[in-house]
Image (tube, rainbow, N blue to C red):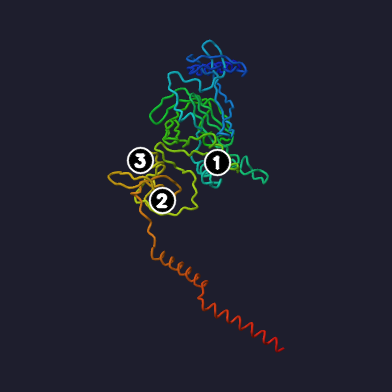
Amino acid sequence: MKRIILLVLVFVVYYGNAVCEEITYVVTQDTQLSGENNNLLKTPINEGILVFFQGRTRSSKIVASYPDIPITQYENEILIRTERGDRGWIMTSHILLLENQPLSISITDKIWIQSYYQQFLLEGAEKEKLLQYEPFWTNIQEEFLQDDPNLPPWWTNVAVTNFVIQNNIIKINRIYISDSRTFITISQRNENDSVKLNVLNLGEMNFVRQAPLNRKFIEGNTYRFTLKLDGDYMDIIIDDDSQAIATLVGVDAYFQREVINFFRDETVNLSRITWPRRAEGTMDYPPPIDMSSYRPTHRVTENLRLRDSSNTSSLIVTTLQKDTEVQVIETGTSSTIHNITAPWVLIISSTGFTGWCFSRFLEEIAVNNSAADAIDDTAENSLVSNKDAKVLPFWVWIVIGAGVVVGVAVVVIIRKRR
């Protein structure tokens, strides 16, 4: 029995090393290896040489600022072996799968989070609403977060699941509390609006099995990821499933931190947020604007594109639906579109968007002029009446004065008779 177990272990080690060594990278810049067991031990390594994956990954902490707020980020590293036998850690950004093109920086420079987190950050929605998207929190609350008046509410444990997608590696961090997944890329194919990756689930930290992403993956298995891009939005499809396992938005660390602050009941500052857009420029969630002085002046007569600037080449903010009410706040230059000449106008929509649109497709909201005139007349008459009440004719003042004199004289005569 012991001999069988030993043979199995030898096979697993041999097979694991064989799989790892099949993953070959080319070094894309002059760099250095950190020692396998000693980070202070550095080995220079030159651009262009081949290196081989050795089955392990790790993350190194770095600090970024936006621009004056320190925010912790992480750099991924993998353990490799060179052809001459050197072993050490190398940053994933310094190597590339052999005979593959790098991923677009529009993917690798972002942190990808679930798109539904936007509405919590923007609208300040009730935190219990998260159960509509992540219903497993009910079970987690019952199992791990028992009702205790001394404990913080369950939503303070929400760490915001995020996907970090880089050349050679994909990490799903904080899968509902602290679970994670690490995938190493085996092969990659770039297409027009998508990327297809074959990946190996290399390791996992798994505490909450009922979380959907934990049930989806098994350590040691390979999967096919399809990343379908739409600007700052991405659908992730696994294997041949027709439905995405997640719809994500690409954000920076500052955005991610503010979402975490929201669920931790801490102060949220939206002033430095850049809101995600789709490829054509539209936004599912508009940046917050002050609606306190909003007063509708016009109505949209047809579905109408709202743009960043007063021209048809600028990005589309959103499409205003017919009958949407808007407030015109500025009139810009005129343009001729489809033989129609009209000015561009800057508007605020009742749906909370702001931008420029072609005024040809706006109609002024009718005002009940007779009622307005009646109100104005009433106000004007009231003002006239008040004015007249304060300015009395001269003869009235004479009569009043004479009355006062007579009254005083009567009082004096009575007192003398006494």
Where residue 236 is drawn, which disc sits there?
none
Q: Which residue is mark 2?
A: 328
Q: Earlier in the sequence, mark 2 or mark 1?
A: 1
In the displayed structure, would residue 121 be above or below residue 35? below
Mark 3 or 1: in front is 3
Amino acid under disc 3: Thr
Residue at x-position 44% and y-position 27%? 104
Q: Give the alpha-carbon distance from disc 3 to disc 1, as whole Å.
A: 45 Å
> Please, which residue is most extreme toward the bottom here?
417
Where residue 136 is drawn, which disc sits there?
1
Amino acid under disc 2: Val
Q: Give the alpha-carbon distance from disc 2 to disc 1, as whole Å.
A: 45 Å
Mark 1: few/some/many CA within 10 Å (<14, 14-19, 20+): some
Q: In the rendering, at what x and y percent does residue 302 appear?
A: 34, 49
Mark 2: few/some/many CA within 10 Å (<14, 14-19, 20+): many
Q: In the rendering, at what x and y percent does residue 376 appear?
A: 43, 65
Amino acid under disc 1: Phe
Q: Which residue is mark 3?
A: 312
- Residue in the foreground of this view, choosing between 412 and 23: 412
